[in-house]
Image: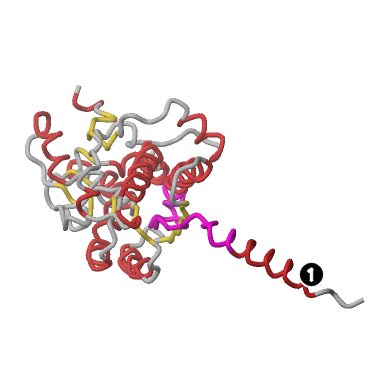
Amino acid sequence: MKPSRSTYIILALLALVLLAGCKNVKSPEVVKIGLIAPFEGPSRPLGYDTLNAVKLRIQQWNESDAQPKIELVALNDDGNPVLAARLPAQLAQDPDVRVILGPPQGHTAMAALPGLEESGIPTILLAPVRNDPSDMILTYAGLGAHYQKLFQPMLGILPPAWSQPVSQPVIWLGDPLTLAEILHEQPELIPAAGPVAGEEAFQQWAPDVAWSIPWAAPTPAGLPDDFAAEYEKLAGKKPSLAAALAYAATDQALRIIAAAPDYHPGPEQLATIPLPDITFINANLMQ
């Protein structure tokens, strides 16, 4: 039986109603946060401490009613400065990457700086570097001068160092292997260190001296009361200082993305992020 003309009209009206309804339904916008960290090699534990903290905060955000929804793009730098220097350009190819986090090691952060500046993407650094590079890069883990000032009352004026050669006493802010090697061969050259002394890789390479070297690290305030428990549930281990810093940085990244026009944060949003205090973690030799 052939449908009547009135049936066609009714079907057409239903189709129009459905189309109108579809126009009113807007899918939540999804933007991305980039992460640069070592996921292979000796510093793999540090990379995954960082990754798990970032994943935890993004997961919590996406499970809430907050907008926009966030995806994570994590790139492995292997703890290698040459590789780290190339990764910002890879992240910059994706227009949906709105903030970059990392690297969490001083030597790779220093190497990545030129690429991060060129990318034009707001960046929250997770390791100390020499100078404030630009208003698009937040030195969230501090500058070498901050560590120098912290140690000065006890050890005098020591220059910060990220790489060899080291010919005078310094505060070491570079990689864990070099830190272990120098402490075994000429311990007087590194009387203090930055966050690198908290790395599992350093503690494995130099277990005989890791307990005694004075070191300092950024310690974010205001973490949720359940952070440690939620992190351990996800990662299967207690959070390190690096994990706490990465979680806090991710929280700030989410906040500035959500507050920015079209979810594109810039220097004005970065400038609203409070910096964590840099404090002594192990000061055994200074007591």
Pick the front one: 23 or 55: 23
Q: Residue furthest top?
A: 287
Q: Quadrant of the N terminus?
A: bottom right
Residue that mark 1 sits on: 7
- Residue 33 painted magenta: yes
Pick the front one: 41 or 35: 35
Q: Residue furthest left?
A: 157
Residue occupying the point 76% across, 73% down: 8
* Segment colored magenta: 20-49
Determine which quarter of the picture holds residue 80: bottom left
**Is 118 drawn above or below residue 150 in the view shown?**
below
Pick the front one: 177 or 45: 45
Residue occupying the point 84% across, 74% down: 3
Residue occupying the point 23% across, 38% down: 274
Residue 200, x across and y down, in percent: 42, 42
- Residue 129 painted magenta: no
Q: Amino acid at mark 1?
A: Thr
Determine which quarter of the picture holds residue 111: bottom left
Residue 48 falls left or right of residue 199: right
Determine which quarter of the picture holds residue 243: top left
Residue 283, x across and y down, in percent: 24, 28
Residue 68 falls left or right of residue 81: right
Residue 191, x across and y down, in percent: 19, 38
